Amino acid sequence: MHILEICLILLALTCLSSSLTRWVKLPLPLMQILVGTAAALPPFHLAVTLDPHLFLFLFIPPLLFADGWRLPQTALKTLRWPVLGHAVGLVLFTIFVGGYTLHWLIPAMPLSVAFAVAALVSPTDAVAVSAIIERVKVPPTLMHLLESESMLNDASGLVALKFAVAATLGAGFSLLNAAGSFLFIALGGLVVGWLLTFVYYHFQGWKFIHSSDAAVQTVLLGLLPFAAYALAEALGLSGILAAVSAGLSASKFNLFEEAHFSTRMQAASTSNVISFCFNGAIFVLLGLQLPSILGDGPSGINLFHSNDRLAILGEIVALSILLVILRLVWVLVSAIFGYIMKSRSEVPGCRIMLASSLAGVRGAITLAGALSLPNVLPDGESFPSRDLAITLATGVVLCSMLTAAVLLPLFFRAGVTETAKTDLSNVRITIIEAAIEALSRIDTMVASHTIDLIKDYRARLTLVDQGNWEINEERFYKLYKIALKAERMKLLELRRDGRIDDVLTRQILGEIDSVEAALERQPVRLIPIESKGL
């Protein structure tokens, strides 16, 4: 099948699965996997050969870039040590304990291959984590920790996998060389991502592209994660971390916060569409691979007919439970250590720690890494236990998704907290007052218009507590532009001072952009809606 046909079918299946969730109350990733599996079975028999390297290059960079861009900088700074501990310490702990346990559980599997399997299942997946917790009201701190960890631990797991495979191939293993190589690959990837974003930031500042040329700027921004990934991989560095670093740097440099509003709106819309398509395609692809992996496919282990299927299913369940236990132990020890070292005011409750342990969802990175295992050794012999390794990794991906999708909603049922609503109202009041101050300084022929507009803004201050206002057709285009600019500048000032986070900044910035977009078509005036009884 031609690659173009495959892409169109994947997009169609992604849309179909999204529509089905309206009638079948399943998490979207699980529905996408089911739809993909159904498409691979009779009577459709849709077969897609997955090239792991092409898969990583096409799907992972833009998704990790988007996650890095949206990740609140203040939260990442606050959680830097827990994130680093999970992204490196937990991965190495999982590989060490998981490798020896797996070798003890399956003596026929060589120790180096057991370490390779443990390395495959050690990193959580940013795309899978975001998709699973999307409909669950997870506390912000835990959500930021899960997303940050899953973006950074891929490098730890994949580098460890590289050394485990090298040891299996007979290249030997040196802890000192491995540690040095890991630092070089990880830090190098981070530097590449930052450097390319830095160059793009100054390229944008030099006005080679007009600030209102939204299409060109959006396309260039879309190319940035691919460029960072490709350049890092070509230099032998971590392309995954380069894409993450590019996203984090784009947020840090405020690439679009001070751009023309049309550029921000188009970039946000494009990013949402790409994220939807690529996220969905990843899980549909996983579903398409399942009949092949679990049947007579690249794994070579037919779980539907094999006499060992019960033993293999038991090994998958045992490995999945082990991963939850190891994660729980790490979370508990880290929390106690942080409390002792005074970096945390209190130890998280049992509910938070259990939820954090269950939220370690595996996904595309694990599957792609498993399928990238070599087929043969240098002497021509088959790679030992490759079939079983692929089957175990695939089983863990499914188990982690099912566990998180079923159990996490039981831990968190609450909606948006009142604190979040209060913060939003306070920020709106602050930026409206900044707009009033800017308008009050105007001493021109349009003074009467200014007074009317100030009245509108004062009406908005009154309506903030009620949470209501509406946009109606009116005048004062230039004055509104001044007021909206004052709102935007005050909002960015609050962000720079660390008084609000990136999520709240983007939410309110989107509201301001919506008003300004309406102004481009027809001057507007905000009026109270008391007459409607609201």
Image (spheres, grey):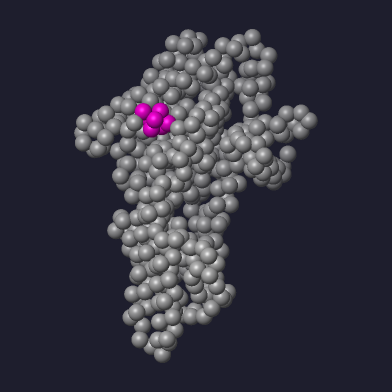
Q: Nearer the viewer, residue 321 or 176?
A: 321
**Percent x, y of residue 506:** 44, 57
**Percent x, y of residue 78:** 30, 44
Specify the segment rendered in magenta. Answer: 350-356
Up the image or down, 5 lies above or below 527; here it is above
Residue 112 visible, this angle: no
Residue 38 visible, this angle: yes
Furthest residue to the right?
43
Quarter occupied by residue 502: bottom left
Residue at 35%, 64% in the rendered image: 430
* Number of dots carrying numbers: 0
Q: Quadrant of the N terminus?
A: top right
Residue at 54%, 78% in the rendered image: 474
Main secondary-structure element of the magenta-colored stretch: helix
Q: Nearer the viewer, residue 228 or 74?
A: 74
Furthest residue to the left?
341
Quarter occupied by residue 159: top left
Q: Nearer the viewer, residue 375 or 170?
A: 375
Up the image or down, 56 lies above or below 511; here it is above
For residue 119: magenta? Answer: no
Residue at 33%, 63% in the rendered image: 493
Residue at 67%, 26% in the rendered image: 291
Up the image or down, 303 lies above or below 34; here it is above
**Percent x, y of residue 59:** 55, 43
Up the image or down, 160 lies above or below 106; here it is below
**Percent x, y of residue 513:** 49, 65
